Amino acid sequence: MLSFEFFHRFLISKRAGSLVKTISRISIVGIWLGVSALIVVVNVMNGFNKSIRSRLLEVEPHLVVDFADLSSSRDLTQHPVYEKLKSFEGTLVAPISHQDVILRTTDGFIQQAIATGVTRERLLQLLQYADKKSDNREEGLAEKVENLKFGDMILGMGLADKIGLFRDDSVVIVPPENMLLPAGEIPKVSQGTVRGFLLTDVERIDGQSFFFILDESFPRLQGAAGRHIALEVWLKDPEQAEAIKQAVATAGVTIETWKERNASLFFALKIEKFVVSFLVGLSTLIAGLSIISVMVLLLAQKKKDVGNLLAMGMTRRETKRTFVLIGMFLALSGVVGGVITGILLSLAIGRFSQDVLPAFYEETSIPTEIQWVQILAIVVIAIVFSYLALNVTMKRLSSFRPSEILRS
């Protein structure tokens, strides 16, 4: 192909001009590094987003169902919506209670916390996930959960660290509204005993919550004004949450999907990914603009060759297309190299980055996820931009006059 032959002779061969050859190589390397960095950044952001999403789906309910006029777990399990939800295959439906409380240790430390009442089945599910995540399987988890009794509680690891609680320590649980009682009236408090810890890498659970068996461990908390009770639903396929929500929706019932409950988090992750990708892409764009400099310099140095082509009968359109293709070969050299390097680096990072981050991060490895559609989009955008920029640059060929060029 004539364009490729010109690309080789004019830009990268030994006989090419030293200035043009140097700038061409700098352009290729700049585009190569820019595209590589963009692909690695996008893949790492994809990996972190996938990691956060999977972690949330392990500990967060896929649907939360609130009832306007129900206040006990027995009423919840007798409601028609409960039966509808149970009818879906692979669905786990369980009542749960949440309320703000104040914890006071025997050493006098005070800490706000969220008291979460769950079924034994749900608590076992949480502990099994924590064990799997830490890769430190604890034997007899089911028996441990089954043996929890009145006053027993499982603490989030972060909450335990905040107030210095250990296994078998005692703690006083006080609903905050009891602190507003008139003078002389004794507030109703509960005595709890720590029987275990839970680490999920979700701050709302690890740093703020403790868990107990609903309607069994702390009966005094059932009558607290701040107590909120609902149904939590886990689905076989979390993506079906919206469809199931529409199927069971009825008057007096409020249903939230996991996407709605975490909408602000997913929006923040999307904005973060867009901003980082945009900034890296902008640096790649700046590096790509050097192609224009190369082509302008090439036209200035090869003006006589352009005149020869026009004099031999090549039309201006064909000449313009030839030089545009020369520039495209230059751009594609960097883009293709950058794509291959970016993919290889992403694979290497995902495989060999275990435990490279400090332990206080929720994710100590650097996960990556390659989405081929995004890589294809990067390649297409790079090609389209290069083509448009080169077309604009090559418009100056219309001012070339073969006779004047050859005469000079």
Image (tube, rainbow, N blue to C red):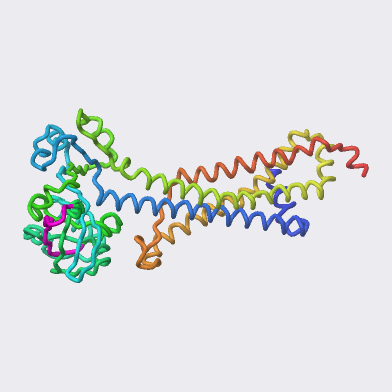
* Image x and y of residue 123, in percent: 16, 54
Q: Is residue 229 left or right of residue 259?
A: left
Tell me residue 173's x, y (percent). Answer: 16, 59
The answer to whether residue 5 is above or below residue 250 is: below
**Which residue lies at the image location 25% right of the left edge and 41% below the top edge?**
237
In percent of width and height, residue 257 lies at: 28, 39
Residue 12 in picture, x, y percent from top left: 70, 56
Quadrant assignment for the N terminus: top right
Residue in front for this viewpoint, 358 or 387 = 358
Query: Magenta segment: does it hold 101?
Result: no
In the foreground, 370 or 258? 258
| In this rendering, position of residue 55 left or right of residue 172 | right
x 45%, y 57%: residue? 346
Write the start and end of the magenta stretch as one range.
Answer: 181-197
| Outermost right residue | 407
Q: Which residue is situated farthest in the front direction here?
A: 183
Decide which of 217, 178 is in the foreground and name it: 178
The magenta stretch spans residue 194: yes
